[in-house]
Amino acid sequence: MNTAELLVKCLENEGVEYVFGLPGEENLHILEAFKDSPVKFITVRHEQGAAFMADVYGRLTGKAGVCLSTLGPGATNLMTGVADANLDGAPLIAITGQVGTDRMHIESHQYLDLVAMFAPVTKWNKQIVRPSTTPEVIRRAFKIAQQEKPGAVHIDLPENIAEMEAEGAPLARDSREKIYASSRSANRAAQAIAKAKNPVILAGNGIIRANASEALTEFATRLNIPVVNTFMGKGAIPYTHPLSLWTMGLQQRDFITCAFEQTDLVIAVGYDLIEYSPKRWNPEGNTPIIHVGENSAEIDSSYIPLTEVLGDITDSLEEILKRTDREGKPLPSYASVRSEIRADYEYYANDDGFPVKPQKIIYDLRQVMGPEDIVISDVGAHKMWMARHYHCDCPNTCIISNGFAAMGIAIPGALAAKLVYPDKKIVAVTGDGGFMMNCQELETALRVGTNFVTLIFNDSGYGLIGWKQMNQFGSSSFVDFGNPDFVKFAESMGLKGYRIESAADLIPTLEEALAQDVPCVIDCPVDYAENVKFSQKAGDLICRM
């Protein structure tokens, strides 16, 4: 057995189902080892796509997704998706081929110091330089990638080490015991909540990772405290719940901003500062905060908790609830906020404008998707509308890249989601800019039999940047481009393509596309004049509480 074969056996031991990647000269021995392995190697069309697939697989399963590249340009292509997983808290293992150790001391074809290069975008990374250490390196990599807060790990395997004879066997996987919060911290939190007249819960992605949404919903319901979720905390409480104030994070003043201006206590549960800077919702740093999570709060002048309740989130919420003597209901102001949010959402239900308003596209998409179906949002102007208007009943049903906010994630992510949940409807929601970054992975999707739908918000430009330019300078520049015929593009790859010609077309087209047994692309012209209108409306908003 050589090192590459031992590495693959270690991956099998970790329960790896898929490895996403590209073949190259320096990873040939690893690829050869996969031929006799139950692990399925999925050949992609670009290493960035491989990393995004591993990224979304990790988010949806809690198990590290694995991606593979060769050295040099293959490894650099991998880095964007690796960085995305690391900042967004998705467990991921990136494996790269490398030149032999006998070539590292001189200038050598395609050689880069990949351990140094991946260091800033991973939790840990290591080069295997002795075959016998492979089981330890792989076990440690998975343990670090999957422990809270999850993230990316990189393993570099030189080609001469890969082919060396190796002794050893995979190491047993250890189970991580839960850590429980102290009674003292739970008591302090309970006392602060009991005194608060106008508290609000800020729900982050840590709730999703900890499978604590039921506990959060019970906590909010029993104490009558309204809940706002971050982009990555969607589904932490069902959006239909009367205490749900939906999503914050648009970086502009809106209804939810008003709610935070009126609160006298923020209970941040599973919240990570990277999800939405506290300087946006607590600019003066004077709002009292309780931090509930598995890890300590980051240091930020706008985020100084009164107390930190650290441990298993479900247990922490239950312990605080036991100790809290609080009766009463949310102030009428919160009911007003929820009413205004819902009215704004429902306003576009029957809008027949064309090109289609983004609010209408998302409203119709929500109508055809079931509570447990999944959308993967790319990054761009549509992401801001998805964050505001696509609401979730269940956790992990709207995946948004927000920490690193990398364009191009939607199509590879949808492929991974369909592999994890083949019986669910999966939709990749993307702008035309993001679509063109990784649209080649639609061929991969067809080849591996993942029949999801890609919905393109088509405005022939980088809409989000144009939006920012209009807000800052009153005009936009350098953001316009041309597009191929997306219907013909899809058909040329063996997919089905659709073009929306009126607002009334969208729901029947979505329903037809979701029923197909091949990947489908829907080209939907979008009216992004709504972007500036939203900014103007937000600027004029007055908190009526």
Image (spheres, rainbow, N blue to C red):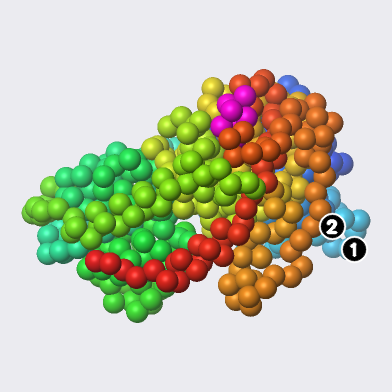
Chain part drawn in magenta? 506-512
Depth check, front residue: 242 or 99: 242
Q: Quadrant of the C terminus?
A: bottom left
Is the magenta region chiefly helix, strand or loop? helix
The verdict on residue 392 being magenta is: no
Using the rendered view, name the quadrant where residue 476 is placed.
Answer: bottom right
Q: Which numbered tag is attached to residue 107?
A: 1
> Residue drawn at (72%, 57%), measured in percent from left and top?
461
- SS for callout 1: loop
The x, y position of residue 314, in whole percent, is 28, 44
The x, y position of residue 475, in whole percent, is 67, 73
Type of the residue with mark 2: Tyr
216 w.r.t. 365: above or below = below
- SS for callout 2: loop
CB atoms of marks 2 and 1 within 8 Å: yes
Q: Which numbered tag is attached to residue 111?
A: 2
Using the rendered view, name the quadrant where residue 426 is placed.
Answer: top right
> Residue drawn at (33%, 40%), measured in percent from left and top?
240
Depth check, front residue: 411 or 62: 411
Q: Is residue 502 shown left or right of residue 315?
A: right
The verdict on residue 507 being magenta is: yes
